[in-house]
Image: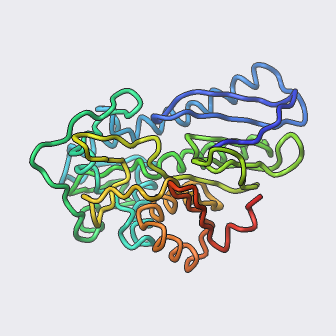
Amino acid sequence: MRIDKPSKKNNIEDYFGAMGTDISLEINLDKKISKKRESELKQEVRDIFTRNEGIFSRFQRDSELSKMNRKLGVKTEASQAMIEVLLLCEKFNQISKGYFDPRVLENLKKIGYKKDFRKNYPTATAKGTELCKVTGKLADDLRIFPNERKILIKKEVDTTGIVKGYTIDLVKKFLFDKGIENFIIDAGGDMFAQGLNSRNSKWKIGIEGLEDNSMMLAISGMGIATSGISRKRWTIGGKTFHHLINPKKPNEFACDLKTVTVIDEKAVEADGRAKSLFLMGKERGLKFANEHKIKALFLDYKGNIYVSEKIKKHVL
């Protein structure tokens, strides 16, 4: 997903890596600030991503998530951030009627996705094992005790599906609290755009997967997230795999859709909905988006674009 962003003398820009993806920050300022102030802002944004990566990474053995997944059936203490994200996982599971489900981690491991994709390309799958359909209610395997700040899980979970959006919303709040009114934060295609760009117009976002900017989306005060398989797709033994596993039909790796993009008031809401709609497929997903008034855009591998009614006002 590309950003149309004219440069300006007083802009602050920063680029770094976190959560297995590339992060970019642009702040559009009316007045120039000191180098010290600029450095502090950049560092705090980086720290927010670093802290959450240390909580939610399934590739770091000492992350809170990894430790939690090693204590199945045991009631354990959890950070406030973990509680909030797990509650969001429950919410998206209910809203999507089970298409969003954090209990797919075992299947991800079986198809070879055990390490950071950018550093370790999957080369082998578990032999002689079929992927398991996720069954039963999520609430039976994931119990959350917010008042006690504790959780109990019976199956391993993966919160990756919404952590980038959740973290972007934290960055948004941080910048709001600092009185910054015009900015965009991009974490691998998941974004929040606030205020105006340096041309005093809404931020223009390209559609990830399109070869040109023949269609763009204009947003302000909104989060936007894209879910797709272009970046994390691999072939082993003649069979194609990708990281978006359908919990209802885990052995079917549909490759008809290229990306699904969703706009919402919060980046995490866009994140969860984009993944849910992708897993539903084009027809079911588009129908669901219209029924639930979701701003969604579907792009298939033939270059065809399908849009929900609510997103049309953002299309350029």
Residue lying farthest to the left in this orientation: 128
- Quadrant of the image containing the N terminus: top right
- x%, y% of residue 258? 49, 53
Colouring method of the image: rainbow
Judged left or right of residue 277, residue 236 is left
x, y percent for residue 225: 57, 53
The answer to which of 289 and 90 lies nearer the viewer is 289
Q: Give above or below for 224 relative to 285.
A: above
Q: Residue furthest top?
A: 35
| Image-based side of 6 in relation to 41, left or right | right
Q: Position of residue 307 (x, y in %)?
A: 62, 67
> Along the horizontal axis of the image, is 27 left or right of 2?
right
Residue 222 drawn at (x, y percent): 69, 56
Front one among 298 and 6: 298
Report the number of numbered marks. Answer: 0
Q: Residue furthest bottom?
A: 291
Q: Is residue 56 above or below residue 42?
A: below
Which of the 4 quarters of the picture holds residue 182?
top right
At a point 87% along the width and 27% down the height, the residue shown is 9
Q: Does 9 appear above or below 56?
A: above
Split into 4 quadrants, where in the image is the C terminus?
bottom right
* Towards the viewer: 29 or 23: 23
Residue at (48, 51) in percent of width and height: 228
Instruction: State the image quarter where residue 296 is shown.
Output: bottom right
Q: Nearer the viewer, residue 236 or 158?
A: 236
Q: Quadrant of residue 299?
A: bottom right
Residue at left 64%, top 34%? 24
